[in-house]
Image (cartoon, helix red, strand yellow):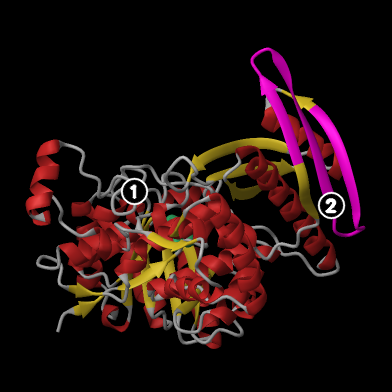
């Protein structure tokens, strides 16, 4: 029987640290549910001490996802480890993931510690973590730029203290496959107790080698791969989960390792993440890009029509890309809608289904054919959990080549039940709408990024708008979908406004609580 490689997903921790990819609690939970359906072995849900939001994310993901292991990252200090454990208290399968850098560069410039001190801190951290749970992972940050003799010493010591997983990160994406192979092989040969722990790898993609390095490490003996959906992560990102998993599946002849991933959920996972963050993958991205299965050249099309094997090394269906994806029409009922959502992996509560059905019938009046992407948009946009303090009642914008753009906006304030209307002029219709909204809400938003794209096909396509808006220096991603771009733009902006207000309220509610020191890791 072939050996198994565990897939450790860090989309919600390392991935979430990348610019534009921050998620609120509800979004993290939605993503965690999808990761669970995807079959990952470990979900790293956050860095519990980094913020109240991270703490809540770890705690709530641990409560929600009972099958996979749920991990929280922490540094080697007592405060960090205790906080991680507190967040994991309700987990069915908790893992404490503690890390410290082992390269001389980090020791000298970042930690200002000697090798002996770091060795002792590593030992103590694992010992303390082990007093809480059996499942303890230790990461030697910047391992690939660490002195190999010292790395052997640290890894031996932490396994001695009970670490069950030892991670050898390529933190700055510096290594190449041959060198990484050598590092893993050396650890296997020279760490006397290595058989008591699983070797894990964690590759960043600064040289575009994250996936290649991860696979090389597996061939050399690693049995856990840390990666993210769409390869999001610090700087150039982390190794991409979908690329690793499909490489293992397609080239099983050379890499005979099992894993628990349901590959048919890959595309949906990628879409779910893009939908939440507004960060879309490039069209030519392997596995999940729009063009990954599109054959443009005539000679290729001819070959594929004769036999797909000529130019396709995997089928679109194997990663969950549907070739025929019209799913529902105007006359589909509530039951059919519910069933379709279930097939897509979403179980809706009764009120959620009612809300989704209302939005579905409205959309079905505007569009003849409803695709899976439309249903996803309804889910993401229409029934999100953020309380809607301000709701759009009406929007009207005028613009032209020789006239100043103006907008008239009416909002309902659900706190006071008041309806307010205001007008504004702007650089364009969207800008005018946003100025009018600011006048009503009294909040000044700074639009830092705005994207609009068509998410379905045809002239009646649904357009999706993402607005990254800053309020008081904190950025929020608002999104909305509609067949009318001005309407979607207004609602996307309001979505960001409502998120900002919700975050403010949550902060106020937890004001009396002790706020931990902020922390960050690659
Ligand atoms: O890149 C890295 O070294 C990390 C560790 C904290 C695992 O993310
Ligand atoms: Zn990392």
Q: Is residue 92 left or right of residue 424?
A: left
Which residue: 51% across, 61% down? Answer: 330
Magenta: main secondary structure equals strand
Q: Residues within 10 Å of mark 2 (few under 14, many from 20)?
A: some
**Which one is nearer the viewer's eye here, 447 or 226?**
447
Disc 1 marks which residue?
A: 289
Which residue: 77% across, 31% down? Answer: 407
Q: Is residue 372 left or right of residue 82?
A: left
Which residue: 25% across, 65% down? Answer: 318
Location of the N terminus (image quadrant): bottom left
Q: Is residue 267 magenta?
A: no
Report x, y in % for residue 8: 39, 69
Magenta residues (range): 395-424
- Indicate yes or no: mark 2 CB to ligand 2 under 8 Å: no
Secondary structure under tag 1 reads: loop
Label annotation for residue 412 = 2
Q: Residue furthest front?
A: 331
**Which one is nearer the viewer's eye here, 413 or 143?**
413
Ligand 2 is found in the corner quadrant, namely bottom left
């Amino acid at each position: 029987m072939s050996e198994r490689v565990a897939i450790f997903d860090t989309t919600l921790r390392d991935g979430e640290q990348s610019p534009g990819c921050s998620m609120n609690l509800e979004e993290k939970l939605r993503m965690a549910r999808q990761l669970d359906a995807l079959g990952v072995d470990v979900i790293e849900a956050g860095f519990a001490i980094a913020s109240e939001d991270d703490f809540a994310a770890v705690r709530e993901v641990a409560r929600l996802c009972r099958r996979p292991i749920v991990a929280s990252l922490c540094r080697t200090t007592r405060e960090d480890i205790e906080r991680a454990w507190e967040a994991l208290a309700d987990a069915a399968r908790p893992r404490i993931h503690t890390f410290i850098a082992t390269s001389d560069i980090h020791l000298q410039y970042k930690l200002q510690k000697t090798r002996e001190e770091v060795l002792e801190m590593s030992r103590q951290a694992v010992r303390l973590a082990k007093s809480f749970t059996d499942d303890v992972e230790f990461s030697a940050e910047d391992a690939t730029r660490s002195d190999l003799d010292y790395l052997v010493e640290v890894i031996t010591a932490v396994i001695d203290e009970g670490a069950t997983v030892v991670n050898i990160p390529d933190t700055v994406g510096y290594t190449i496959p041959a060198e990484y192979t050598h590092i893993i092989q050396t650890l296997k040969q020279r760490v006397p107790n290595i058989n008591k722990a699983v070797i894990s790898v964690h590759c960043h993609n600064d040289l575009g080698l994250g996936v290649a390095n991860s696979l090389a490490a597996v061939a050399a003996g690693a049995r856990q791969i840390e990666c993210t959906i769409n390869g999001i992560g610090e700087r150039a990102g982390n190794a991409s989960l979908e690329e690793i998993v499909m490489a293992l599946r397609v080239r099983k002849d050379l890499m005979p390792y099992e894993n628990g991933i349901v590959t048919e959920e890959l595309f949906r996972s990628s879409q779910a993440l893009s939908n939440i963050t507004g960060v879309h993958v490039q069209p030519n991205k392997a596995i999940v890009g729009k063009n990954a299965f599109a054959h443009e050249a005539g000679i290729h099309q001819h070959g594929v029509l004769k036999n797909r094997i000529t130019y396709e090394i995997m089928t679109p269906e194997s990663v969950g890309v549907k070739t025929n994806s019209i799913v529902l029409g105007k006359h589909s009922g509530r039951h059919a809608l519910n069933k379709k959502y279930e097939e897509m992996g979403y179980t809706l509560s009764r009120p959620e289904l009612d809300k989704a059905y209302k939005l579905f019938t409205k959309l079905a009046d505007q569009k003849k054919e409803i695709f899976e992407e439309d249903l996803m948009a309804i889910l993401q946009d229409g029934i999100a959990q953020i309380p809607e303090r301000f709701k759009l009642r009406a929007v009207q914008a005028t613009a032209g080549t020789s006239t100043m753009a103006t907008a008239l906006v009416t909002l309902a304030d659900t706190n006071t039940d008041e309806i307010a209307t205001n007008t504004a002029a702007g650089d364009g219709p969207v800008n005018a709408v946003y100025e009018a909204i600011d006048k009503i809400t009294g909040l000044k938003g700074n639009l830092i990024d705005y994207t609009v794209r068509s998410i379905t096909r045809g002239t009646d396509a649904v357009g999706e708008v993402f607005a990254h808006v800053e309020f008081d220096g904190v950025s929020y991603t608002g999104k909305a979908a509609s067949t009318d771009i001005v309407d979607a733009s207004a609602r996307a902006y309001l979505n960001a406004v409502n998120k900002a207000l919700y975050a403010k309220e949550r902060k106020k509610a937890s004001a009396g609580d002790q706020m931990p020191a902020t922390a960050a890791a690659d």
